Amino acid sequence: MARFVSLFGRRRAETEFDAELDAHLLLMQEDFQRQGLSPEQAAREARLKLGGIEQAKELHREARTLLWLETLWQDMRFACRMLRKDQLFTAIAVTILALGIGANTAIFSLIDALLLRSLPVRDPQALMLLAWSAHTTPKYHTRNGYGDCQGHSTSGCTFSHPFFNDLIARPGVFANVTAFGGNTEMNLSGNGSATTAQGLFVSGSYFETIGVRPVAGRTIEPSDDAPAAPAVAMISYGYWQREFAGSLSAVGATVGLNGEPTTIVGVAERRFAGLTPGIAPDAWLPLSMRPRLVPGWRSEDDDGGSFWLAIIGRLKPGVPRAKAEAAVNLVFRNEMLHGAKPLSTEADEPAATLAPAETALVGVRADLSKPLFILMSAVGIILLIASANVAGLLLARSKARQKEMAVRLALGASRMRIVRQLLTESVLLSFTGAALGTVFAIWGARAIITFVGTRTSQPLELVASIDLRVLLFTAAIALGTGFVFGLAPARRGTRVDLTPALKGGTSGPADRPRSDWFNAGNLLVAGQVALTMIVLVGAGLMVRTLQNLRSVDPGFDAANILNFRINPTLVGYKGPQLDRLYRDLQQGLREIPGVVSVSYSSVPLLVGWQSSTSYRLPGASEKSTIESDRIRVSSDFFATTKMPLLEGRDFSSADFLAAAASGTPVSNSAAPSPKAAQPIIINETFVRRYLGKVNPLGQRLELSHIVPNDAGFVIIGVVGDARYTDLRGAIQPTTYVPATGGGVVFELRTATRPAAYVAAVRETVNKANSNLPITDLMTESESIDHLLFQERMIARLSSFFGVLALVLACIGLYGLLSYEVSRRTREIGIRMALGAGRRNVLTIIVGHGVALAMAGLTLGIVASLGLTRFLGSILYGVGPNDPLTIIAVGIVLLLVALTACWIPARRATRVDPMIAMRHE
């Protein structure tokens, strides 16, 4: 203690000496000025005369710095000794802080990877994504966004190929410009068993524009993007490792992509998995290969009415974004208003804009951003609970150190010096917890990414690494947490009455009367309970939302259905070959023992996919459109899904033959000329919304756009309503047409557990064609779980954090009551000696804990009513202020709090009055 006092004295003396030197220098300058010298000459002469005064000042500054570092080092060593001495307290506090800080670090690392990290390209700030907007929907015939950005009917970020060609023909707009699009599943052969790969079509300047180098071979070049150029591909580093085991022999190898011999020319560098977050192509292909690789490609797929290309430009150095945007807008308006096929009018005011590619390319951000920010709020509350918990432990621990603090004060240490020492211990605890929490964070972030990746058939190329930004975040919250939970105990530890403390008794704040309910310990515990209430209510609402969604009637029987997807067009099947293959597979799958029925359709139910068509009633104007979801289905589809047929009949063999002969259109852009009306089945909602009380059977429909010689459709049946895209929205009008051509999804209804039939399904498909890969092989229940992944993610993690908050709050309540029991041991002994029974003592201790829990519950309920409204947009079937959830959470929290109170209360009833009265 004497050394501490000496150090403070030395520092004060050196500060005074430094001030005296400055004052002496000023006096000498004034003397030289009175002798007629200018201020500059006087200052120079004073320095020369004093000689080493500046050197002396610098030495004293260095001495002060060394003194500060020396005292800090002493504080650190003393803190380590004290924490090592009380190992149980240290272990508990570090574990609590590790959980709180680790949870925050894990979620922040995901936010960093998804939202904050720069694109893994050269100078990403200079990359601009083109977007457009108009007052009304342009007259394009197809539009695909491929998940790169969010758009609406009057806005988007995809453009036509002719517009891109016009843009690159205008030099001076950008330093470089490139386009990409058509992230498409392709069949890959020639490297073992046939597999599928995601291929992204890019212009020849793609890799040059974004600044990505190959780790092996070369990149795609402009010369590769020509119709007569040999077919080439550049593969991703991840795909190279998965499918080629990282062998350099992959470069130069020839593989089959949808039957087209293609040479692999290079492997992209490891850090680059794609520009769009969460969308990682396996291979990049020149735009010129699209007609050769996309089944059913037509020349109109590349005309001015087909929007499918995302365009990125690199700004020239020194060129402002506004100038480049004005040049791009001029080209876009000219194309939309005066192109070969004008798509807008002057009144529509079509306009093109530029946005930073780092933020404009959305990808999986649209699905994950909101859940991550909700979870970040939850873990922030967890950190507050952990901080309050450790603060309570430190307050209880300060009682045992009162004599130590009294000795320090008696030997001359200032209260600020002691506060600094205690804060050093708190910060050291916090940083130790942060170091352990970083380990938890790495495991937690990987677990969350794995969970998110289960909803995709392709690996999710999202790496939540602990980089410098994450470490700085962890260090910042560790430092802040250390001060937050350490300041109150440090200040309280210095408020000691020296005389009683040095005699060995208790004094000061620890002996406040029990009627003082507003002491720091009580407030901390009540705050923990309130914060826990908020987290648990949020978790309860999300769990109920998930339960409500899972209990929604989809309109069909989802149990015991196994789905898988195949696309024979990728391996050369066309027209009648496709239909024959599907019929043969349907028959072969029916013969598997235990399979009840088999069907196929263009898209699976409840996976988030959607296809729609616009119809009109015969004789109605083109503006009187009937919007309807649309599914191509096979025979037995309604029997397999157990979708009730309410009126009319199911499709017959003749219906499929007629549809195949007439070329049933698969989109509004297809325009064959059938000779007879095609059969169609509608759902109940279609009847209610568009036909009213008219008998639907035999009614005719036409496509909304004019098709020469089109005989339209005839309604032959009505089925019950079934959910098509999701479980949240209202059921939309839906039409079912005979399935012909294209890729399909097979549905198998099985007598027992569907997963048991996976091997038999693969064997049957392999017999039909060994080069035909199967994708998305899963049960219908698994598909629904994938559809609800956002709700499942928030519900699971918020439940975990809720349980963690509950445990921490109970530890805090238990610790406070244990401290109260030890502090009031003598009082309890006197009460029992005067005749108080064990029940009276039990009531006092438990009553104290229950009162704190009730106070926290009240605060928590009030806070929950205000905060849970931010969850309103993702809740389903339950309100943000649902009373049932709040009451249920309150009861659970109160029961757990009673358990935490019971243990120290039981210990209080076992106090021996004779020993207690001699206590202290």
Image (spheres, rainbow, N blue to C red):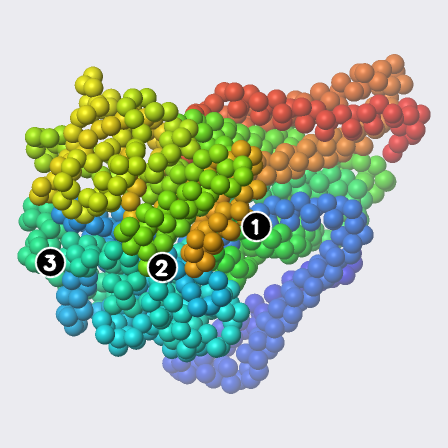
User: Is 633 located above or below residue 549 in the figure?
Assistant: below
Distance between the Cα atoms at labels 3 and 1? 48 Å
Residue in front for this viewpoint, 520 or 865: 865
Residue in front for this viewpoint, 70 or 286: 286
The residue shown at (53%, 59%) is 465
- Going by the numbered disc 1, the residue's amino acid type is Ala
User: Is 688 located above or below residue 184 in the figure?
Assistant: above
Residue 46 % position (x, y): 49, 81
In the rendered image, the quadrant that contains the N terminus is bottom right
Point out which mark residue 335 bears. Answer: 3
Residue 349 % position (x, y): 11, 49
Residue in front for this viewpoint, 65 or 827: 827
Point out which mark residue 571 bears. Answer: 2
SS at badge 2: helix
SS at badge 3: helix
On the question of residue 345 being in view, the answer is yes
- Sequence order check: which comes first, mark 3 or mark 1? 3
Distance between the Cα atoms at labels 2 and 1? 37 Å
Mark 1 closeness class: few <14, some 14–19, many ≥20 residues within 10 Å: few
The residue shown at (45%, 79%) is 43
Residue in front for this viewpoint, 142 or 145: 142
**Toward which corner of the image does residue 826 lie, by quadrant?**
top right
Confirm or deny contact between disc 3 and disc 1 (CB under 8 A): no
The residue shown at (58%, 25%) is 889
Q: In front of the other: label 3 or label 2?
A: 2
Mark 2 closeness class: few <14, some 14–19, many ≥20 residues within 10 Å: many
- Going by the numbered disc 3, the residue's amino acid type is Glu
Return the residue at label 1.
447
Distance between the Cα atoms at labels 3 and 2? 37 Å
- Sequence order check: which comes first, mark 2 or mark 1? 1
Q: In front of the other: label 2 or label 1?
A: 2
